[in-house]
Each structure stands twice: as C-alpha cells, then as structure tokens.
C-alpha cells in the first residue's frame, strides 16, 4: 500500500474516508513509514520504538486499541496482527477534531448532516466506542468487573505506592457507582453484570466527550523522536 | 509600584478626620483623681471604624440575602454599591463632607490581595491551563487593544470638538486614561459571574483574562503616566522600547515571584507536621509576602499572587492536615468576600464625594460607548483569530457574553484616584468618567447579564458531583491522547502536559510533598477517598438512607439491607408508617421490639464507624490533636470501602440471595439454628418478612467475615481499640442470639458499642469505664429509651442458648475471672434473672483488659477513673435501672 499511496486518487479516497486533509495524510504516512520501518504494515512490536510511549501506564491497552478489529471496523471481535496505513488512519481519525480541518462549506454540510441523522451522532459514538472497546477487552459488549479492575490497576500502576488492593477497591467503587447510575434501584434478584455501551454513555453524561477527545494533527514535527 | 508608592499605609477608613459628632465625650482635661470611667475613643478609633465598616457591610449582606427574590435578580455587587451611595449620602449629610473614601493604598495593599489569592488558589487549574492560550490573548492583546483604541478615539472625540474644551488633555492623557479604564476588573467579574453560572470555559476565559491583564494594565499605566509626567516632548524612542520591555519584565517577573513563593510555601508546609496550627497562617503569610514583594519590585502583584495560589495548591493541600485545609478554605473565602463587600460599598460611598470629580457629558458618554464598542470589536477580532487554532471554537453567543462581561471595577477607580492632578490637569473629569463607567458596568451590565445569558441560552455549567467513573475515564483519556500524540510524533499540548506530570511526579512532588502524602497522592485515589467519606458521613448522618440509595443498589442482599435500614429510621421516628412504602418494612417494624433492636444493632454495627479513641484532653495553644479526626476519617473510609466491597462480592459471585436460598446456609450454621429455635421458643410472632431479613443478614455476616480476614492484619496494628471492640462484639453476639438477626456479627473491628450495647449492659459498660467514651455521639443520641424493654425481653431468653463460637481470643481470655464467666467455658453467658449486674466487670478486671492494649500514657487516666467506675457499679447493682442507661452519657461528660 505504501508505494501505491502516492497516487493522488488514493489520497483523495483516504481523505474522503477519514476526513484528514492531504497534507495530514502525507505527514501521517511519513510517520507511519517511520514506525513500521518502511514496511507496508505495522505490528505491535513497532510501537515499542516510540520512546515516549513507554511511560504511559495504559500503554498496552492503547496499543491494543490500534489492532482491535472493532475499532478497525473489520469484525465484532479479535485482534489484527498487523495494520496497514489505511487502518492506521482509521484509528487516528477517531481523534481528529472535526471542524478545524474542514472548509466552511464542509462545516455547513456536516452540520446539516448531523441534523439530519441526529439519532446517529456519529462522532460521539465512535469516540466513545473506542474508549469502550479499550475497557471491554473480551468484546462481549460489557465491561465486567474484572475488566474494569484491570484498567484501573493499569491506570494506577504509575504510582508504586498504591497497592493493587486499593486499585481493586477503586474499581469496585466505580462499578457500584456505575450500577447505581445506570440501573437505579435494582430488584432484589437482579445482578449487575457489567457496563454496557448504553450505560457507558450514561456515565458520560455531563462530560462533553467530543470536546475532550481530540488531538491536533496540524504542524506535526515528526522525526527526531523515533529512531 | 507607583500606586503603592503614592499610597500611604494609612488605614482605610480611619483616614477620617475627627468628627465632633462621633465623639460623645472627649478625653478632655485631666481629672484630679482616679477616673472611674474614661472614654478613649481616639485610641481605638482606627481599628474600631474598620471593624464597624466591615460589620455594616456584613450585616448588609445578610439583609440582602433575606430576600431570595432580590438576590436572584440583582447581583450583590449592585446592591452593595447602592448601599454605599446611600451611606455616603448619609455621611455627607451628617458630617458635611465626604468621608471614608476608597483609598488606593488600602485597596491595593489590603482589599485586593485576599480576593486575588482566593481566586488564584481555587482556580480550576486544569481548566485554566487548557485555555491558557485564549486567556493570554485576551489579557494581553485585548487589553492593549482596548487601551489604545479607547484612548485614541477619545482623543479624536476631543479633536472633533465633542468634548468640552475645559477638559485639558492631550493624546497622552487620553492614552493614560484609556489604559486604566480598559482593564477588565477581576473583582467585578468575579462578583457578577459567580452568580450567573455560565459554562466553565467561558467563565475561565473572562475571569482568567481579568486576572492576567493586571500586568498589562500596570505596565501601560506606568508607562503612560511617566510619559505624561515627562511631557510628550521629552519621550524618546528608547522609552517606547523600554515600555515594551517592561511589559515582559513586569509580567514574567510577577509570575516568577509568585512561583518562587509558591515553591517556598509548599516546601515549608512539608515540615509542619508538629505544628499543624500554623499551617493556614503560612499559606496566607507567604502568599501575602508574594504580593508585597511583587508590589515592592513594581511587578505585577496580582499575577504574583495568582501564580502563587495556583502553583502551591496541589502540594499544600497534600501536606497540610485536613483541618488546616478547611481552615484555609474558609478563611480565604471569608476574607475575600469581606474585601469584596467592602470594596463595593466604599465604591458607592466614594462616588458621593463631588469635590473629586467634574462632569463632562461628552467625555462620559464617549467613554461609555467606546469601551463597549471596542471591547466587542476586540473580542470578535481576537476570537476569529483564536478560532483558527482552537479545537473547540468559541461561538457567537460566547463572544457576546465575553464582550458584555467586560466589567470595570475598583482597580480602575483606584488607579484614577492615584493620578497626579498637577501632571494630569483633567484628573477630575477622568475620575467622574471612571466612576460612571464602573457604576454602569457593574450595575447596568451586572443587572442585565443574567437575563441576557438566559435569553441567549448560553450553555450553563452543570453542577454535577465528581463521580469516580468520570475521573477514571478522564484519566484514561489523558493517557490516550498523550499516547496518540506520541504515536503521531506530534509534540502538542497533551504531550507537554504528560511530560510535565511526569516531571512533577518524579521530582517536584517528591521534593515538596511530605513522604506520607506523596505515597498516596493520586487523583483517582483522592476522588475515591472523598466520595467514600461523603457517602459514609451522609450514611451516618441520615441513618442509612443515603447509602442504601446510592451505594447498595446491588442484588438482593443490599436491598434487604436497605429494608432494615429503612425500618430503623422508622423506628427512630417512633412509627412504622411514615414515608415508607415497602410493606415488608412495616412488617418488620411490627414484628417486635427485639427484632428492631436486632436490625438496628446490625445496622449500627455496620454503619457506624469504630468507637472513638479517647481524646486527650489537651488545650495546648500550639497543637490541635487532629489525629483523632484523621483517624475517624480513615475509619469511615475503610468502613465504607468495605461495605462497597462486600456488597460487590455478591455481585461478582452472582450470589443471589432470594428468599429460599439463604435457608440451607442457615442450617449449615449451628449458631443460626439456635437463633431460630430461640425465636420459636420465645413464642414471638414470626412472619416471613422477618425471616428474610434475618437470613439475608446472615449472608452479610459471612461476607464480612471473609472480608475481615483479608484486611484484619492491616487494621489491627492500626488501632489499639480493636481489642475492646472485639469484646464488645462477643458480648453483643451472645446477647444477640435471642433476637435473631442480632447474632450477625459484622467484623469485630468495626463494631462500636452500639446503642443496643449501651442499652443493655450499662453496668458492664460503666465497669469498663473507658468504653463509654468510645460511644460516638450519634449512638447515644439516637437510641430510643423504650428499647430497653426489648432488651429485657431478649435477656430473658438468653439461658436457652448455647454459646456461640467466638474468635475474639485476646479479649475473651480475660473474661474467665469474671464471676459469671465460669458458667460458659467459651464466653460468659449471663443468666436471665439478673443480666445487668453480671455485665459489671470489677474495675480491676476492666483495667486488666485494657492494659493489653492501652498505651502506658493512658493508664493514669484509667486509674483516675476507677472511683467513678466503682460508683457506677453500685448504682447498677441497685434496682434503680430505669435511668441507668443514660449514664453512658453522664460518664462521657465526666470524662470530657
């Protein structure tokens, strides 16, 4: 794919698919090649080359998200072994701020579109889904307590003084809270099995997911960071 | 700084000359003999007047808030200014001259710092730094723009002949005036916007701008002022350059001073472990020192204090004790609110003084129009530029609110008062114009901004409590975004924030935070901790309602639990009806006192925190024994955490305690069988509802026991009180068998001598002496006296019970010497005929029991008590038991 990529139609196609501008695609492609070592695909090991990533406590989850079939829109579950540039762009496009890269008409267009299919709420859903998939590691559509604990433990792994036990209790507490937020008063026999995606969105009420989850892709100073 | 230099340190309100009217009696000529009564007004005049004015302002505040209708429509600042006008009028009428002006010196040295410190310290730093770019743009570019355009336009107005020729001012004078009138005032903005509740981004932008533009205002004012004083002819090109350079010096210097003091402050609080009492003082002193230092070096003092508060907060909050934190918070808020009130009131009063100002309609109207117009224009232009870069663009409505929210206030007024009339001949006109502008913005704009915000449907800030999930997700977000930037290789905002956090964690926090604080320092943990404390406290406060509705909404067990809790609440209200809709609850309530006791006991065992340690009765001036508080918090925390966990376990294992399920479990335990039997023999009505409750609670017990085994080691080393608690448990346990669910023995360590204990075994309790102190105030408070009867009933059936398994070995070992203890090998069982005296430990025994765990320091006190305890025992052995159950309190009282 790398070689064919220079073809302008292909770039335009990617533009349409991911919403990146051609400059950004160019830049991202450069970065992609850097990461993959001029291979057409990236494997998990390639991410080890990013030095800054090493300090990230939830690094493994994030890297995993790049290979998650659900995020790649390739299947309901499972992990891909390697991703090509288009997949890479797909993942990246989740974090793309929506309005700034578009022209005025495009903004108008997308607004109208949004109005038309307001029920779909495309950007919010997909971003939320990426996050959700990160938590839901066994892709059963639920964040179970185990999965939640796992995430919290990783989140807190940066602090050596916080024990696993407290991380677990935090996860438990959060789960309790989620249960009370999403289900309210439960029937005696009811058991809360895990956070579904709907519950997940419910928890997010009050926080504007769209305004928080984005990265600026302009002016990327590539290089020098990666060997 | 100029304004500081000009201002004398004279106390604000004391600047008044002596007034004959205010002195009912003058000191007068010396009297020959010893005076019986002497009137010393002059000696106290200055502080007295200050206090009096603050008092008046505070009282006015109270009066305003008596009517909710008024305060919901009119901002407090408007009311205060109007009050000031009225008071000023009165003073003017009485004293025939204007008194009690807002002195610039007072304002800058005393009134402004608390407000700025408060806003800096409690600034939502994350939000602030997220929007720093926009804030800086508006603060620097916006202020410069406003100053120059307003000044130039006014000059143009004068050239056009619309300003009366008696206003003698050149371009430089107008620029000077523009520089002081252009700055958005933090005090006014804060006062108005706090009541409007626009969304956080909008608020932080307007408010941040008002704080950060101080540097620009100071520089502009200073530069223009010196140019005016030099005369425009003498200004050379290098002076302009110097002016530009001084902008950087003043702003960066101010920020640097603030950061240095923030560092010092954080470092100092690291070592205050033994002198907790001065922690709040340190915060205020060092922040004030930052302000004064910056002022001394003619740097931006507001910037310095803002940065100091912003920078130190994280570390200071981690270092100082919980009480100090509360103190700092309240003192800061009190001071700021007080200063704000006084400022607005004095502004009103100052406006009355007509000798200071001279009116020119053209200038006033022109200024009003220009500042509104250029503010709006500036905002639109800057926002357009900013929106090219911002990920979340500011829309038109935001811009309207931002332009309209540019309030001017006391800073402008103080600056204009500081002008030198000999150098600036038009000073009086400027003063009048400033007053009008300030009043217009604060009153008219302040009044209308609320309806405007409503009308424009500006996104309001939703006030939601922080939830654990959101905190977790936000952290995940930050990490994800940082990771994406890493992957992309783009060093953006998230990248640098991540870097900074790592640097902070590695070096700064370690250097500036107490070791103990550093360890558990984590935001997620903090939120979790706070939520837990909140839940637990509200649980304790409200007798269980809150927790049952928020925390325990998991499967059957918790919901059962909540039934029990509701019933207890009902019991406490002395009726089974009330607002309770659950039939089962009413059932339970009806089913007999002893069951209620049981349920209640269980609830309290689970819900109340551990019995308090005895407070050391120390009244040192230098120390507050706040360990107790912290310990309590910790207990509450652990307790609540446990609850959450235990209720969660059932979820995890998918254990559904339906009505039938608990039964087999029950039979598995001999103890519980005994209970049921006892129940039966008691011949009390057994209804299904009660059975369920009992059964379910059994499962609670098992959960809790599991839990206990997990965490007991960590707990035990922690508190010596455990042993006593354990004993209490064992006793309770035996008592409880009668009453069914009471046998439920939640973990020993968390059992307080619950009210049920208190009821039943006062002699034992008083024999124990010290234990009475452990009863928390809640327990003694809420126990209905008539529960006594229920306990008596349960006592009567004690004999039929076998002794339960007791695992509280250490405490039980000291029981055998007990006179009645011999009857039961494992644990003392008390004959029903005379249960009370049997509980009474001989004082020596009690002492022996205590000596295991009591530190040696406590022993003397213990011995002191013994006469008291002996006395108590006698009273209990005597038949007069009716009032005995309140002796706990008596005992407590005597102890404390």
Image (spheres, coloured by chain):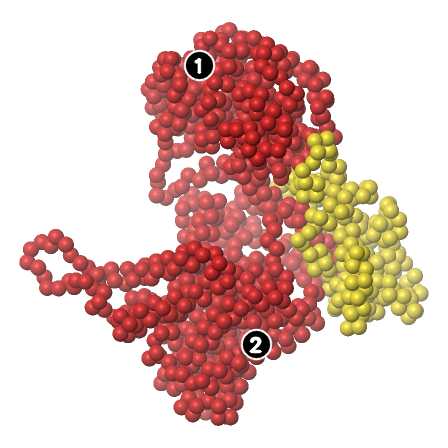
Chain colours: A yellow, B red
Packing grade of label 2 (10 A; few <14, some 14-19, many >=20) is many
**Location of residue B614 by image quarter:** top left
**Relative height, residue B140 to residue B166 (above, below):** above
Regarding mark 2 in the picture, which secondary structure is present there? helix
**Residue picked out by circle 2:** B375
* Residue farthest top in this picture: B823
Whether the residues at callouts 2 and 1 have beta carbons within 8 Å, the answer is no
| Residue A142 as seen in the image, left or right of residue B98 | right
Residue nearest the viewer, comparing B214 with B319: B214
**Residue picked out by circle 1:** B836
Residue B623: percent from the left, percent from the top? 39, 42
* Residue farthest front in this picture: B577
**Relative height, residue B804 to residue B304 (above, below):** above
Residue A49: percent from the left, percent from the top? 79, 55
Instruction: Give the position of the C terminus of chain A as an image quadrant.
Output: bottom right
Using the image, name the chain to which the residue with label 2 belongs.
Answer: B
Using the image, name the chain to which the residue with label 1 belongs.
Answer: B
Residue in the picture at 57% in, 79% down = B374
Regarding mark 1 in the picture, which secondary structure is present there? helix
Mark earlier in primary sequence (2, 1):
2
Residue in the picture at 64% in, 35% down = B552
Residue in the picture at 47% in, 76% down = B437
Instruction: Give the position of the N terminus of chain A as an image quadrant.
Output: bottom right
Residue in the picture at 54% in, 58% down = B123
Residue B456: percent from the left, percent from the top? 63, 67
| Residue B399 as seen in the image, left or right of residue B360 | right
Packing grade of label 1 (10 A; few <14, some 14-19, many >=20) is many
């Amino acid at each position: 794919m790398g070689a064919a990529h220079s073809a302008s139609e292909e770039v335009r196609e990617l533009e349409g698919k991911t919403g990146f501008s051609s400059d950004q695609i160019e830049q991202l492609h450069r970065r992609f090649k850097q990461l993959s070592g001029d291979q057409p695909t990236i494997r998990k090991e390639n991410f080890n080359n990013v030095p800054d990533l090493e300090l990230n406590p939830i690094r493994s989850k994030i890297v995993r998200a790049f290979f998650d079939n659900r995020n790649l829109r390739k299947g309901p579950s499972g992990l891909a072994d390697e991703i090509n540039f288009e997949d890479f762009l797909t993942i990246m496009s989740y974090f793309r701020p929506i309005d700034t890269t578009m022209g005025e008409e495009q903004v108008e267009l997308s607004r109208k579109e949004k109005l038309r299919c307001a029920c779909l709420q495309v950007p919010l859903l997909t971003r939320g889904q990426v996050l959700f998939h990160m938590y839901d590691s066994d892709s059963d559509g639920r964040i179970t307590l185990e999965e939640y604990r796992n995430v919290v433990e990783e989140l807190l792994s940066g602090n050596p003084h916080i024990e696993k036990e407290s991380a677990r209790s935090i996860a438990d507490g959060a789960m309790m809270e989620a249960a009370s937020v999403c289900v309210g008063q439960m029937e005696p026999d009811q058991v809360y099995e895990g956070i579904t995606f709907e519950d997940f969105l419910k928890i997010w009420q009050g926080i504007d997911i769209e305004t928080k989850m984005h990265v600026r892709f302009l002016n990327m100073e590539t290089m020098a960071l990666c060997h | 700084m100029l304004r500081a230099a000009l201002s004398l340190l004279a106390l604000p309100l004391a600047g008044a000359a002596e007034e004959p009217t205010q002195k009912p009696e003058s000191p007068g000529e010396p009297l020959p003999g010893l005076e019986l009564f002497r009137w010393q007004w002059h000696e106290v005049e200055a502080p007295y007047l200050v206090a009096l004015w603050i008092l008046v302002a505070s009282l006015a505040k109270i009066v305003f808030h008596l009517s909710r209708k008024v305060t919901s429509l009119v901002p407090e600042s408007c009311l205060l200014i109007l009050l000031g006008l009225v008071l000023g009028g009165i003073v003017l009428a009485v004293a025939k001259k204007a008194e009690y002006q807002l002195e610039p010196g007072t304002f800058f040295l005393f009134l402004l710092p608390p407000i700025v410190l408060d806003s800096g310290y409690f600034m939502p730093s994350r939000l602030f730094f997220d929007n720093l770019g926009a804030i800086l743009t508006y603060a620097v570019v916006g202020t410069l723009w406003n100053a120059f355009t307003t000044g130039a336009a006014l000059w143009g107005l004068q050239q056009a002949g619309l300003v009366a020729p008696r206003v003698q001012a050149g371009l430089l004078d107008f620029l000077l005036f523009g520089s002081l009138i252009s700055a958005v005032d933090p005090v006014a903005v804060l006062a108005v916007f706090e009541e409007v509740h626009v969304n956080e981004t909008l608020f932080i932008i307007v408010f941040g701008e008002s704080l950060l533009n101080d540097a620009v205002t100071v520089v502009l004012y200073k530069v223009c002022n010196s140019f005016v004083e030099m005369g425009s002819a003498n200004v050379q090109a290098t002076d302009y350059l110097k002016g530009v350079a001084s902008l950087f010096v003043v702003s960066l210097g101010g920020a640097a001073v603030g950061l240095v003091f923030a560092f010092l402050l954080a470092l100092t609080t690291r070592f205050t472990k033994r002198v907790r009492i001065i922690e709040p003082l340190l915060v205020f002193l060092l922040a004030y020192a930052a302000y004064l230092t910056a002022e001394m070096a003619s740097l931006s003092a507001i910037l310095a204090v803002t940065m100091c508060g912003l920078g130190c907060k994280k570390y200071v909050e981690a270092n100082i004790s919980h009480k100090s934190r509360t103190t700092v918070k309240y003192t800061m808020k009190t001071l700021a609110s007080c200063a704000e009130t006084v400022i607005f009131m004095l502004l009103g009063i100052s406006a009355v003084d007509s000798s200071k100002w001279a009116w020119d309609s053209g200038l006033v109207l022109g200024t009003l129009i220009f500042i509104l117009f250029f503010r709006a224009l500036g905002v639109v232009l800057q926002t357009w530029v900013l929106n090219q870069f911002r990920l979340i663009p500011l829309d038109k409505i935001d811009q309207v609110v931002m332009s309209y929210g540019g309030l001017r206030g006391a800073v402008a007024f103080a600056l204009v008062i500081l002008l030198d009339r000999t150098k600036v001949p038009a000073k009086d006109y400027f003063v009048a114009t400033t007053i009008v502008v300030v009043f217009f913005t604060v009153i008219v704009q302040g009044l209308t901004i609320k309806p405007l915000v409503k009308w424009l449907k500006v996104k309001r800030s939703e006030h939601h409590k922080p939830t654990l999930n959101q905190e977790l997700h936000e952290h995940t977000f930050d990490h994800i975004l940082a990771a994406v930037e890493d992957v992309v290789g783009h060093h953006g905002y998230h990248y640098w924030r991540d870097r900074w956090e790592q640097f902070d964690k590695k070096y700064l926090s370690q250097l500036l935070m107490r070791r103990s604080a550093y360890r558990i320092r984590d935001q997620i943990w903090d939120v979790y901790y706070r939520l837990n404390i909140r839940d637990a406290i509200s649980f304790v406060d409200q007798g269980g309602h809150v927790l049952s509705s928020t925390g325990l909404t998991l499967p059957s067990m918790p919901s059962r639990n909540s039934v029990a809790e509701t019933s207890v609440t009902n019991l406490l209200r002395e009726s089974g009806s009330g607002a309770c809709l659950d039939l089962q609850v009413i059932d339970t309530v009806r089913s007999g006192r002893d069951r209620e006791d049981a349920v209640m006991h269980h609830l309290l065992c689970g819900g109340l925190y551990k019995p308090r340690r005895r407070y050391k009765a120390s009244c040192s001036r230098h120390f507050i024994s706040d360990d107790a508080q912290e310990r309590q918090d910790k207990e509450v925390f652990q307790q609540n955490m446990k609850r959450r966990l235990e209720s969660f376990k059932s979820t995890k294992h998918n254990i559904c305690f339906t009505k039938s399920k608990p039964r087999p479990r029950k039979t598995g335990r001999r103890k519980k069988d005994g209970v049921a039997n006892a129940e039966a023999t008691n011949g009390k009505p057994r209804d299904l509802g009660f059975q369920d409750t009992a059964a379910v609670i059994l499962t609670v017990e098992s959960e809790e026991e599991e839990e206990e085994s997990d965490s007991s080691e960590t707990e035990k080393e922690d508190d010596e009180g455990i042993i006593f608690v354990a004993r209490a448990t064992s006793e309770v346990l035996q008592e409880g068998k009668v009453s069914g669910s009471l046998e439920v023995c939640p973990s020993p360590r968390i059992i307080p001598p619950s009210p049920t204990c208190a009821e039943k075994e006062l002699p034992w309790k008083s024999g124990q002496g010290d234990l009475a102190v452990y009863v928390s105030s809640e327990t003694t408070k809420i126990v209905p006296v008539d529960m006594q009867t229920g306990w008596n009933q349960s006592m009567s059936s004690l004999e039929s019970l076998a002794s339960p398994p007791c695992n509280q070995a250490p405490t039980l070992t000291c029981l055998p010497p007990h006179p009645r203890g011999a009857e039961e090998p494992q644990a003392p069982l008390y004959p029903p005929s005379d249960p009370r005296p049997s509980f009474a430990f001989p004082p020596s025994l009690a002492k022996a029991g205590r000596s295991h765990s009591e530190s040696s320091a406590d022993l003397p006190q213990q011995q002191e008590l013994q006469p008291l305890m002996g006395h108590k025992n006698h009273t209990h052995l005597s038949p007069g038991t009716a009032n005995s159950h309140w002796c706990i309190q008596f005992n407590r009282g005597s102890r404390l």
